[in-house]
Amino acid sequence: MPATGTTVKTLRRGLVAAAALPLLIGALASCGYGSEAAKDEPKGKADSAAPAADGAKKLSASEVRIGYFPNLTHATALVGLQEGLIEKELQGTKIKPQSFNAGPSEIEALNGGSLDIGFIGPSPSINGYVKSKGSNLRIISGSASGGVKLVVNPDKIKTLDDLKGKKIATPQKGNTQDVAFLNWINEKGWKVDPESGKGDVSVVRTDNKVTPDAFKQGSIDGAWVPEPTASKLVSDGGSVLLDETALWPDKKFVITNIIVSQKFLKEHPDVVEAVLAGTVKTNEWINANPEKAKASANARLQAESGKALDAKIIDPAWQSILVTDDPLASTLKTQSDWAVKAKLIEEPDLAGIYDLKPLNKVLKAAGKPEVSDAGLGAK
């Protein structure tokens, strides 16, 4: 399967401490695409809609509502909206950003008509597609791979076999990391009830915001989590026992997709193409400017939470994430098979979950190779 992914690499020169980073912007969308320098001034509140440029020609929709998580695994969204890389492609169409903390709530917003396009993990994408019997969403692009680690208390757990009998957190029952961990447990020959999380390993479903405190207090012994939570645990004395990339062929697996409401895709294909043109340019810019992109993502997180990530957290976290236009569709099918095996879902019919025609049109225009839907594309 062809890939257009670009690795987010850490340059050897030291990063200016995250706490000293200027707040590049206060809104999710800022000034125009292509700026090589970090912006110096904020532009308002994080949840405000980005204004369209005066006199700019509007596309078929006056605004587009874009959802994402304040996670580094959503780097394309953080940087693309922060730096205005998506906004420029939208011409006169306004961006209305929406931040979510969990996949189900984002899917609910998409189903309810309050969200048009979203950055989201594979498991909620699958669940949302299957529960609606294929009627509510399409995956239209990849966004990120990697950025998931098993971090443990090194005083209690020294080898993978030591996980038996321990309490390990995942973000949510049935979420992408929960499914991966349950599958790993199953392959070890251990037993865990997928509903309660009880068994040879206690799987403790814990919000990522709470996990670091639970780890410091000793109520959990480790966690299988995305970045930056994994690196926060390491900064609190944890040790990385396993990077999930080691479990995958070519060390790639989808961690973040871009999805769209089928209704919005049908009614506003020009807007969808414009957003995808912005995300493709964002990934290209991230690769060309890894340190500036890292600072931009951190500034977006600072605007969200009021606090930037320390360099000791963001540096290793950023290095472990791959931004990619490729949805890595075959790995989504594998993750679906894992959820079935874990008895979290019944065998789903994923035919039609992808519509990569708009993305491949954008990639072709940019002189980039097209990407595959692994036979799961819409007809």
Image: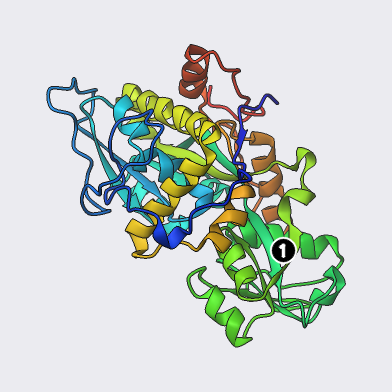
**Looking at this rendering, what residue extends furthest in the front direction?**
13
- Residue at 78% over, 82% down: 156
Viewer-closest of 346 and 238: 238
Front-lying residue, 271 or 310: 310
Residue 313 to residue 157: above or below = above
Q: Residue at x 13, y 27 (%)?
A: 54
Regarding residue 135, the answer to whether it shows in the image is no
Q: Is 26 placed left or right of 143 in the picture?
A: left
Q: Quadrant of residue 233?
A: bottom right
Query: On the picture, is 218 further left or further right than 155?
Result: left
User: In the image, is residue 262 above or below residue 243?
Assistant: above
Where does residue 76 sit, x and y in percent of width and height? 47, 40
Numbered disc total:
1
Question: Residue under circle 1?
Answer: 182
Quarter assignment of residue 218: bottom right
Q: Nearer the viewer, residue 181 or 324?
A: 324
User: In terms of secondary structure, where does tag 1 sit?
Assistant: helix
**Residue in view at x 53 percent, y 80 percent:** 213
